[in-house]
Image: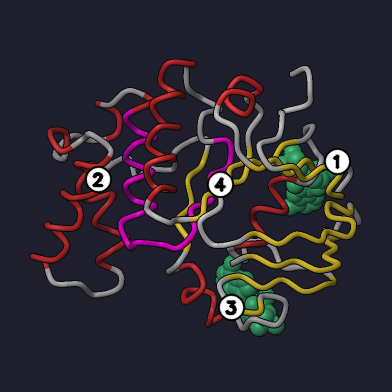
Amino acid sequence: MIDMQGVYKTYPNGVTALNGIDVKIDQGEFVYVVGPSGAGKSTFIKMIFREVKPSKGIVRVNNMSLHNLKWKRVPYLRRNIGVVYQDFKLLPKLTVFENVAFALEVIEETPKVVRKRVMEVLDLVGLKNKARFIPDELSGGEQQRVAIARAIVNHPKLVIADEPTGNLDPETSWEIMKILEEINATGTTILMATHSKEIVNTIKKRVIAIEDGMVVRDEHRGEYGYEI
Ligand code: ADP
Ligand code: ADP
């Protein structure tokens, strides 16, 4: 599903964020990405949906080669990837329904298909009864659940979550984790950057630790391994 070999990323300002990454992730895995701030976690994650282009090395996602992918092919890559952010990134003037429907409508589905699929995913995240609300009328946890619904509405093979519980209280964070585990149970690969020691040490999964742009640890059912 994801294959990186000898991947480097140097930003235009000269900062080298990734310094020789070799990683393979199979379809259906649940992987935490951990490490100190500035270690390269976001760069690593952004490279997978081609928000960042490698300076050197081979990146393959879903059988597409990203290092030489043309800009106009990027939407084909992203169709199979759902992304969830720490700050939700919902469109504030659109309802919950519209925020989720947006992703489907851009690939020209019929209104009937859109309604059915959107209500299906809102049901999955427990927000069917709030379809007409706008983001401001929801709690942080509810907003994140909308963002997850939006991320999975196209049945992506991979969901990437960049600190999805970073802005949430512990109780709400566990709810979000339960939903991500349910999505993973349907065969969707989950890649999640996190600073939550509690989550990583409680819900045991593969742990990839990145420091100074390198993978320093890669363990199945691993530990968080840092004090904060
Ligand atoms: P993390 O997610 O682990 O905090 P990042 O991937 O965000 O790490 O950052 C790795 C390094 O790359 C840091 O030194 C950061 O300042 C730098 N960096 C990140 N994004 C950019 C960018 N767009 N331009 C220049 N430097 C960047
Ligand atoms: P390549 O085609 O060699 O893979 P890129 O995908 O980086 O190169 O860029 C191809 C073209 O798309 C360039 O002209 C670039 O300016 C443009 N482009 C790259 N990123 C963006 C973006 N985020 N938004 C709009 N245009 C972009």
Q: Tell me the distance, in whole angstroms, between the alpha carbons under discs 3 and 2.
A: 34 Å
Label 3 vs label 1, nearer the camera = 3
Span shown in magenta:
142-163
- Label 4 or label 3, whichever comes before in sequence order: 4
Q: Which residue is mark 4?
A: 30
Q: Residue at x 36, y 54 (%)?
A: 152
The amino acid beneath tag 2 is Leu
- Mark 1: which secondary structure? strand
Q: Residue at x 89, y 54 (%)?
A: 16
- Would residue 186 be found to the left or right of residue 62 on screen? left
Label 1 lies in ligand 1 vicinity (Cβ under 8 Å): no
On screen, residue 10 above or below 174: below
Mark 3 surroundings: few (<14), some (14-19) or many (≥20) residues within 10 A: few
Label 3 lies in ligand 2 vicinity (Cβ under 8 Å): no
Q: Which residue is mark 3?
A: 63
Q: Tell me the distance, in whole angstroms, between the alpha carbons under discs 3 and 1.
A: 27 Å
Q: Tell me the distance, in whole angstroms, between the alpha carbons under discs 1 and 4.
A: 20 Å
Image quarter hosting the N terminus = bottom right
Q: Residue at x 13, y 66 (%)?
A: 113
Residue 148 rendering spot, x and y as whole percentages: 38, 44
The amino acid beneath tag 1 is Glu
Residue 142 rendering spot, x and y as whole percentages: 32, 29
Question: Residue at the left extreme?
Answer: 112
The amino acid beneath tag 4 is Phe
